[in-house]
Image (tube, helix red, strand yellow):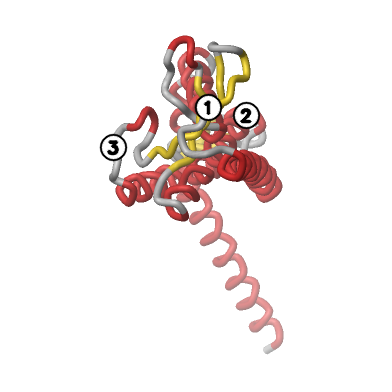
Amino acid sequence: MKDKKIISGLIISIIAMIIDQAIKLLIIKNFELHEEKKVLGDIFTLYYIRNTGSAWGMLSGHTWLLVIVSLLAIFIIGYVYCNLSDKKYTILRVYLALILGGAIGNLIDRIRLKYVVDYLYFKLIDFPVFNFADICVTVPVGLLIILLIFKYNGNDFDVIMGEKIINENGEYIDKKSQKEESKIESLKKESQKEESQKEESEASE
C-alpha cells in the first residue's frame, strides 16, 4: 500500500513537472526575451524573462547555491512524504507531490539553462513575474501551513518528522518503542525456534 502511495505521488509530481516544462518550452519558442503579450489588458500579461535567482529574484546569480538548496528541499519533501502513509494525510501527500513537481521543474531550468524561465505577470499590481512551477510550490505551501495550524496536532507533527507512526487502530505509536517491541518479538521467535529444534533433536536421539 505504501509503495502505491509513493508511486501516485511521483505521478502527480511528474505531471506537474511536465506541464511546467512544456509551457516554458512554448514561451521560449514563441517569445523574444522581455517580450510581453496581453492576456487581460493591462491586468495580466505573459512576459518572458530569465530569472537567475529564486522567487522574486532573490539570490540572483547564485545558481549553484540555489541548485544545492533545491536538492536539499527535494530530499526533505521525499522524507516527509514517506512518513505520511496513513490515509488521514492524503491531502498533505498531494500538496507535497505538487511542491516536489514544481521544485524539480525549476531545478531542471537551473541545471540546464542556468536560469529559470518566468512568464506570468500581474501587471496591474506589478507583482514579480513567476511561472507554473512557482504556483505548484507556493500555493500548496500556503495550504499546508493552514492545515498544520488548524487541523493537525502535536502527534501529527511527530508523524511528519518520522518519530511516530499510526497503527491499524488509529493510535499514535512511538517508532523507538515499536522497534524495541519488534526486536523483543523477534528474539522470542528465535528462542522458540531454537527450543523447537532442540526438542526435535532430542526426540530423534
Query: What whole-number distance in Å separates the C-alpha atoms at marks 1 and 2?
Result: 53 Å
Determine whether label 2 and label 3 are within 8 Å by CB: no
Q: Is residue 162 above or below residue 124?
A: below
Dot 2, how many residues are within 10 Å of its Cα: few (below 14), some (14-19), or many (20+)? few
Q: Which residue is mark 1?
A: 36
Dot 3, how many residues are within 10 Å of its Cα: few (below 14), some (14-19), or many (20+)? few
Q: Residue 101's x, y, as percent?
A: 57, 41
Q: Which residue is mark 3?
A: 59
Horizontal side of residue 182 vs 161, given as left or right: right
Horizontal side of residue 98 vs 76, given as left or right: right
Quadrant for residue 97, please give it. top right
- Identify the secondary structure beneath mark 2: loop
Residue type at the position of mark 1: Glu
Q: Is residue 97 above or below residue 65?
A: above
- Residue depicted at 64% across the width and 31% down the height: 90
Q: Which residue is mark 2?
A: 170
Query: What whole-number distance in Å separates the C-alpha atoms at marks 1 and 3?
Result: 25 Å
Mark 1 or mark 2: name the one nearer the start of the chain: 1
Query: What whole-number distance in Å separates the C-alpha atoms at marks 2 and 3?
Result: 44 Å
- Residue depicted at 69% across the width and 43% down the height: 8
- Identify the secondary structure beneath mark 3: loop
- Quadrant (top left/top right/bottom left/bottom right) for the C terminus: bottom right
